[in-house]
Amino acid sequence: MSQIFVFSNLYAIPIYNSNVLASEIQLKTYSTPVNSNLFRAYIRAELNNVRFTDVHVNSNVEFHFILSFAIDYDSSGSPSPTNGKFNVFWDSDNLSPSQVSSIKSHHSNVKVALSLGGDSVGDGYAYFDPSSVDSWVSNAVSSLTSIIHKYNLDGIDIDYEHFHADPDTFAECIGHLITTLKNNGVISFASIAPFDDDDVQSHYKALWKSYGSLIDYVNFQFYAYDQGTTVSQFLNYFNTQSSNYDGGEVLVSFISDGSGGLTPENGFFTACSKLKSRNKLHGIFVWSADDSMRNGFRYEKQSQALLAISH
């Protein structure tokens, strides 16, 4: 298979399709760090029938809903891997194609993405389990293009957390997938969602090393750190992960049920304000809108209010 390289200012991107021109590759360029008004919310509606319209949307932010999840497993009672043939595992009744179109038409600042993988499927883990790079990519491009067009989606998020493949295979599969979907005009952005686990980090850092300039956002799961994280610890974690994903837009995050990391009650917004004062607040995301229903989306509103402040 022929191979060419596209050079950004940080990365050499291997492209395996000789018919793809270097000029066609969508590359992200890096500049002086600046704050962003991006807010992102994972939403799945598995348990409580949450809808897009339940969630407060501030017109002065860029808002991304992330549907969770599309998984390359079948939807039988005992799901098994399908080698890149993705199926919808969110509540497609409450989060349907028509509802995606409706929320986007009512809020011009809203985009909707889907997330791949997640922690579990059925009663077990959701593994990244490709038969080969070429077959997985071919199946993934086909199945995801169909889902993305059906739901009128804008981007994808990569949230695999368990692996039956080595880091280089993961990097090539996901890198080729993002490259192809962007080149085909199917998506306009892509993000990854790693957390501080050795196996997880080895896979995502391999992906970042080879394809980092094609990844628009790093949804780092800071809530996977221990419950009771302090503001100073959180800021240190942020610096560490910004170094791991050097040049990336690393977003900060909280979990709605307060089960981990730095919570809104214990200083999350203090940390955000400190980062904003240093021009390092690249955005905020929450897991998840479903769990936030019980408090009326209080912290989603507070996050967006902070992000909407221009100074």
Image (cartoon, rainbow, N blue to C red):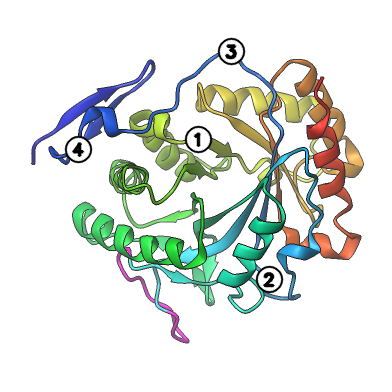
Choose the circle earlier in sequence order: 2 or 4. 4
Q: Are the residues flagged by discs 1 and 2 in contact, CB closer than 8 Å? A: no
Q: Position of residue 239 (x, y in %)?
A: 64, 22
Q: Position of residue 304 (x, y in %)?
A: 80, 41
Amino acid type, callout 2? Ala
Identify residue for label 3.
32
Magenta region, residue range: 75-84
Identify residue for label 2.
45
Q: Residue at x 79, y 59 (%)?
A: 55
Q: In which quadrant is the N terminus drawn?
A: top left
Identify residue for label 1.
216
Report the mark closest to the observer, 1 or 4. 4
Choose the circle earlier in sequence order: 1 or 2. 2
In this rendering, would 128 be left or right of 38? left
Q: Nearer the viewer, residue 1 or 23?
A: 23
Position above or below: 80 against 226? below
Report the mark closest to the observer, 2 or 4. 4
Q: Callout 4: 10 Å neighbours few (<14), some, many (20+)?
A: few
> Is residue 81 in the magenta section?
yes
Q: Callout 3: 10 Å neighbours few (<14), some, many (20+)?
A: few
Q: CA distance from mark 3 to mark 2?
A: 38 Å
Q: Nearer the viewer, residue 49 or 107?
A: 107
Q: Nearer the viewer, residue 305 or 121?
A: 305
Choose the circle earlier in sequence order: 1 or 3. 3
Q: How many marks?
A: 4
Choose the circle earlier in sequence order: 1 or 4. 4
Amino acid type, callout 1? Asp
Q: Which labelled disc corresponds to residue 196?
A: none
Choose the circle earlier in sequence order: 3 or 4. 4
Amino acid type, callout 4? Val
Q: Are the residues flagged by discs 2 and 4 in contact, CB closer than 8 Å? A: no
